[in-house]
């Protein structure tokens, strides 16, 4: 039997459901847990990692309590998103895709979040803040600290 024949046909829905459960439990995907998903579902590890890396909602590193997303789509970019991102990096001491030491914020770059009329836009978790200036950012950060 070839090594690949020992695996069942991968069930994409089952893999995603299992990854979602791990993500809910830990807030991210610890690599040992991802390996365990592959073993328990009897699918190739590459199949599980493929699903885990495809979806932006999964992370292999611990994330903060709040996801701070700076929109860098075209409308936001021309209205000052790079300056907002720079200000947030300096204020939080992290680069995009990093989490603050106190695990409060994970800073993310995102493309258009569908609120171009409010550019520049920052989202914290599921809340959208628009037409932002530097001074607004401090108020927003304080709200979530
Ligand atoms: S470009 Fe930022 S919301 Fe559309």
Image (spheres, rainbow, N blue to C red):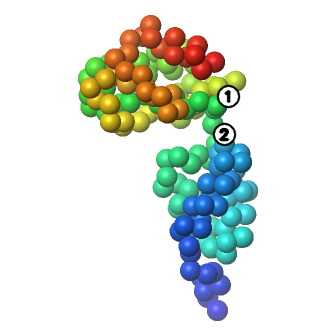
The residue lying at 63 percent from left, 81 percent from top is 7
In the rendered image, the vertical position of residue 89 relative to residue 17, given as above or below: above
- Can residue 132 be seen from the camera position used here? yes
| Mark 2 neighbour class, 10 Å CA radius: few under 14, some 14 to 19, many 20 or more | some
Relative placement, left or right, of 35 versus 115 is right
Most foreground residue, 13 or 2:
13
In the rendered image, the vertical position of residue 129 relative to residue 74, given as above or below: above
Q: Residue furthest front?
A: 127
Instruction: Find numbered disc 2 in the image and state the secondary structure of the residue it sits on.
Output: loop
Instruction: Find numbered disc 1 in the image and state the secondary structure of the residue it sits on.
Output: loop
The residue lying at 71 percent from left, 48 percent from top is 25
Residue denoted by label 2: 62
The residue lying at 28 percent from left, 29 percent from top is 116
For the C terminus, give its image quadrant. Answer: top right
Most foreground residue, 144 or 95:
144
Mark 1 vs 2: CB contact within 8 A: yes
Q: Position of residue 109 (x, y in %)?
A: 44, 33
Residue 45 in which image quadrant: bottom right
Relative placement, left or right, of 6 versus 86 is right
Residue denoted by label 1: 103
| Mark 1 neighbour class, 10 Å CA radius: few under 14, some 14 to 19, many 20 or more | few
The residue lying at 64 percent from left, 61 percent from top is 18
């Amino acid at each position: 039997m070839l090594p690949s024949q020992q695996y069942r046909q991968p069930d994409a829905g089952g893999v995603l459901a299992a990854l979602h459960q791990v993500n809910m439990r830990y807030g991210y995907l610890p690599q040992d847990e991802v390996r365990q998903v592959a073993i328990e579902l009897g699918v190739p590890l590459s199949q599980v990692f493929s699903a885990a890396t495809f979806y932006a909602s999964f992370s292999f590193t611990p994330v903060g309590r709040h996801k701070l997303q700076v929109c860098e789509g075209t409308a936001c970019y021309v209205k000052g998103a790079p300056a907002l991102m720079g200000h947030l990096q300096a204020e939080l001491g992290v680069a995009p895709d990093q989490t603050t030491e106190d695990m409060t914020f994970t800073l993310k770059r995102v493309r258009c979040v569908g609120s171009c009329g409010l550019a520049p836009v920052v989202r914290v978790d599921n809340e959208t803040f628009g037409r932002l200036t530097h001074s607004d950012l401090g108020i927003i950060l304080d709200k979530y600290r």
